[in-house]
Amino acid sequence: LLQLPEDCAKQFKEVKNHASGEETELLIEELKQREEEATEAQQQADVKLLEAKKLASQYQKEADKCSSGMDTCEEAREKSAESLLGQRKLTALWEERARELGWKPGNVKPHRNQ
């Protein structure tokens, strides 16, 4: 039969240990690389999140300006409506006085310059 030297088992263990050490080193290197990639991806995500927050802030400012402008416009419309109502009341009062003095619609005389 085949006879193996006695130190063959020792050599096999040494080779196995050596291979195991290299494998461990490769795994450690791979883990380091993945950690670096994860860190880089996290940094990119942080940058994108910051950019998104800035854009959201800008849009919020624009929305606030728009809302403020709408409020100002609504206030002006309300004041105009009040003023128009006042003018209509005043016109009705003057028209009533004119009728009391004999004025009729369509009875308009041109003004003369004196």
Image (cartoon, rainbow, N blue to C red):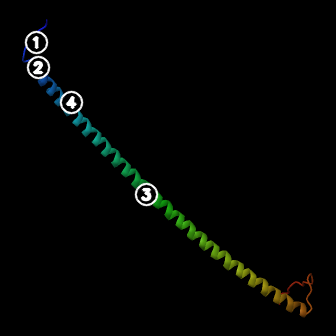
Q: Determine whether the residue tagged by mark 2 lies in a helix, strand or loop.
A: helix
Location of residue 55 with respect to 5 vertically, above or below? below
Which of labels 4 and 1 is toward the front? 1
Given the image, on which type of amino acid does mark 3 rest?
Lys
Location of residue 54 with respect to 71 vertically, above or below? above
Please identify the quarter of the rendering in which residue 7 is found.
top left
Q: Position of residue 22 (x, y in %)?
A: 18, 29
Please identify the quarter of the rendering in which residue 85 is found.
bottom right
Given the image, on which type of amino acid does mark 4 rest?
Glu
Given the image, on which type of amino acid does mark 1 rest?
Leu
- Tell me, for residue 53, which label it has, or none: 3
**Looking at this rendering, what residue extends furthest in the bottom direction?**
101
Which of labels 2 and 3 is toward the front? 2
- Tell me, for residue 9, which label it has, or none: 2
- Tell me, for residue 23, which label it has, or none: 4
Q: Horizontal placement of 82 versus 28: left or right?
A: right
Which badge, 2 or 1, is on the more N-terminal residue?
1
Residue at 92% across / 91% down in the picture? 102
Residues under numbered marks 2 and 1 in contact, where contact means CB atoms less than 8 Å apart: yes
Identify which residue, 57 or 112, lies in the foreground.
Answer: 57
Which badge, 3 or 4, is on the more N-terminal residue?
4
Identify which residue, 30 or 9, lies in the foreground.
Answer: 9
Which badge, 3 or 1, is on the more N-terminal residue?
1
Q: Position of residue 87 (x, y in %)?
A: 76, 83
From the image, which quarter does the N terminus lie in?
Answer: top left
Given the image, on which type of amino acid does mark 2 rest?
Ala
Label 2 to label 1: alpha-carbon separation: 9 Å
Residue to which mark 1 is pinned? 4
Which of labels 4 and 2 is toward the front? 2
What crowding class fits label 1: few (fewer than 14 Cα within 10 Å), some (14-19), or many (20 or more)? Answer: few
From the image, which quarter does the C terminus lie in?
Answer: bottom right
Which badge, 4 or 2, is on the more N-terminal residue?
2
